[in-house]
Amino acid sequence: MKYLPALLLFTLSFVHAQDPISADSITQLEEVILIDALKNKKVIGITPSEVISAKTFQNYSPVDIVSSMNQIPGVYVLSGALNTNRITIRGIGARTLFGTDKLRLYYNEIPVTNGTGSSTIEAYDLENLGQIEVVKGPKGTEFGANLGGAIVLTPKEALGRSTNFSNTFTVGSYNLIKNNLAFNHYDGKLRLNLQYGHLETDGYRENNNFERDGFLLNTSYQLNSKNKLSLLVNHIDYTAQIPSSLGLTAFNEDPTQATFTWRASQGYETNNRDAVGRIPKP
């Protein structure tokens, strides 16, 4: 009982110390939180997958998907031209001279790797993507048989209840012209994203012209609290000339020249593809 007065004094002092400080004349602003459109990862496990979002894409040219993906540890993209890229994950695929194989490429959960195992990520417009997820190692088998892993491309979606229209126009060296037209709508149930993109450039080298047109429809409807129906339509049409590789002597003479046979024949590749998918999501 002899310690009771001291204990009461300590308690009163502690309560007095916790009294809130009266606000002064300075206006206190609420914290501003920036919302990123980054989605949840599609794969879980001990070794995490890597995700880059549209914020990363904005740090680079809208035609430069290579620099964005090279920010991911263990991933290296080697680019010879806009239509020639080689992606390696942890070294897998490095022995392929041209193109990307030994991994699986998905576009909004739709497999776009062809029957020979080749994936052409350059066929898709970077400005249409909301995020890229790279799944490394054995976890990639969830997306089919592969050695290196999987790459999952997710298109942009309308954020918040809004309707908006936007147009992005880019010009650059070597007669680069790129235009991306987008319409987004979301009313709580219907989510609609419609985009058209055009890209053309003469390229740095001879016989290096590239032209691509793309159309993307990504829409979904919330049936109820547990079910959603989604529809994806993606059309790509591009024509790309091929300057091919140069030896050291020819490179030192003129790095802009194309290989003689490809220049003489005006060699090129053309691709016209459609991807259509209906994805019921519980």
Image: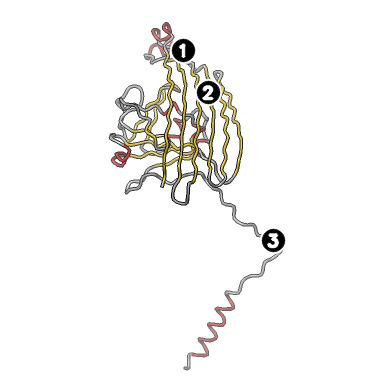
Percent x, y of residue 58: 53, 36
Kindly indicate the quadrant of the structure image that contains residue 103: top left
Percent x, y of residue 86: 37, 27
- Of pointers 1 and 3, the one earlier in the residue sequence: 3
Q: How far apart are the alpha carbons under marks 1 and 3?
A: 65 Å
Label 1–label 3 contact, CB within 8 A:
no
- Of residues 61 and 228, the one nearer the viewer is 228
Disc 3: which residue: 26
Label 1–label 2 contact, CB within 8 A:
no
Going by the numbered disc 3, the residue's amino acid type is Ile
Secondary structure beneath disc 2? strand
Percent x, y of residue 56: 49, 38
Percent x, y of residue 231: 46, 36
Secondary structure beneath disc 3? loop
Going by the numbered disc 1, the residue's amino acid type is Asn
- Of pointers 2 and 3, the one earlier in the residue sequence: 3
